[in-house]
Amino acid sequence: MRESDLLCRVRRRWTKTMSSKHSFPRCPNIIRGMTITRLNQVCLPDINYIRIRAGFVYVAVTLHAYSRKVIGYAVSGSLYTCLGLEVLRIAIARRQTGPGVVQHSDQVLQYASGEYVDELKKHGFLTSMPRTGNPYENAATESFFKTLKHEEVSLCQYETYQDVVAKLPTSLRTSIITRGFSQLGYRPPDEFEEVLLNRENSERHC
C-alpha cells in the first residue's frame, strides 16, 4: 500500500447523540413481518449525525421503504425537536403521502413528541416504532446512513456546517440517481421507481 501510495480509511468510533428517554407514548412495531409491495406503503424517517471539526451536524431524512428513495431531508446544527416535523412536511408535499401510510420511526423525542404525532394524525398516517435499542428493526435507514457516511461523506471531507449544507445535496442525489441497491435488483431508486410506474401505467391501459 505504501508503494502504491494507498491510504486506509479509518472508521471512527460510533457516538450516541440521541436518546429515547422521554414521557411521550410509544407505538408498537406494526411493520414487523409485513411484506412491503408498493410505494406509499411504509415511510422510514430517521435522524443521524455527521461529524465535523467543531462537533456534529444533524441530518434528518425520510425514505420510501419500497424504493429506498429519499423523499425529504433537512440539516441542522442542533438537535431541535421540530427537525423531524420539518422533514415530514417536506415529504408530504413532495409525494402526497398520507392516509394509510405507515410511518416507522425510532422512539426518540423528535418522533414521539405531541406536535409530530398530531401532524401524523392530521394526514392519516399509521405510526410504528421499533423496540428500544434494536437497530435491526429499522435496518433500512441504518444501512442508508452507514453507506452515505462511508461512500460519500468521508470522501467529501466535511469540516464545517457550511460544507455539509453545500455538499450533502450532491451526495443524496448520487444515492438516488446512481447508486444501485441489492433490494432493487441493483437499480438506483429513481430508475426503480420509473420502471415500476411505467409498468403500472402499462397494466392500467391494458
Image (cartoon, rainbow, N blue to C red):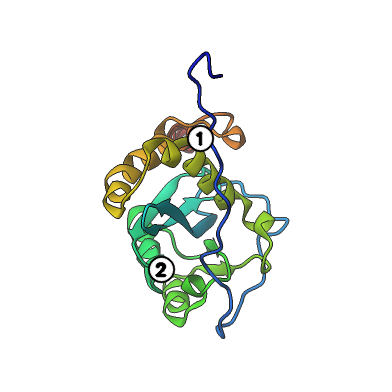
Looking at the image, which residue is at 37% across and 40% down? 157
Q: CA distance from mark 1 to mark 2?
A: 45 Å
Residue 199 lies, in percent from the top left, at 49, 33
Q: Reply above or below: 92 against 163.
A: below
Residue of label 1: 203
**Which amino acid lies under the numbered mark 1 shown in the image of this protein?**
Glu
Tag 2: Cα neighbours inside 10 Å, few (<14), some, or many (≥20)?
many
Secondary structure at numbered mark 1: helix
Of residues 162 and 130, the one drawn nearer to the viewer in this rendering? 162
Residue of label 2: 79
Q: Give the image quarter of residue 105.
A: bottom right
- Mark 1 vs 2: CB contact within 8 A: no
Residue 17 lies, in percent from the top left, at 51, 65
Residue 166 lies, in percent from the top left, at 27, 45
Of residues 81 and 67, the one drawn nearer to the viewer in this rendering? 81
Identify the residue at the far right of this view: 33
**Which amino acid lies under the numbered mark 2 shown in the image of this protein?**
Leu
- Going from the N terminus, do you reach mark 1 or mark 2 first? 2
Looking at the image, which residue is at 53% across and 41% down? 147
Tag count: 2
Q: Is residue 58 left or right of residue 39?
A: left
Secondary structure at numbered mark 2: loop
Judge depth for marks 1 and 2 and give the one in front: 2
Q: Reply above or below: 179 against 16.
A: above
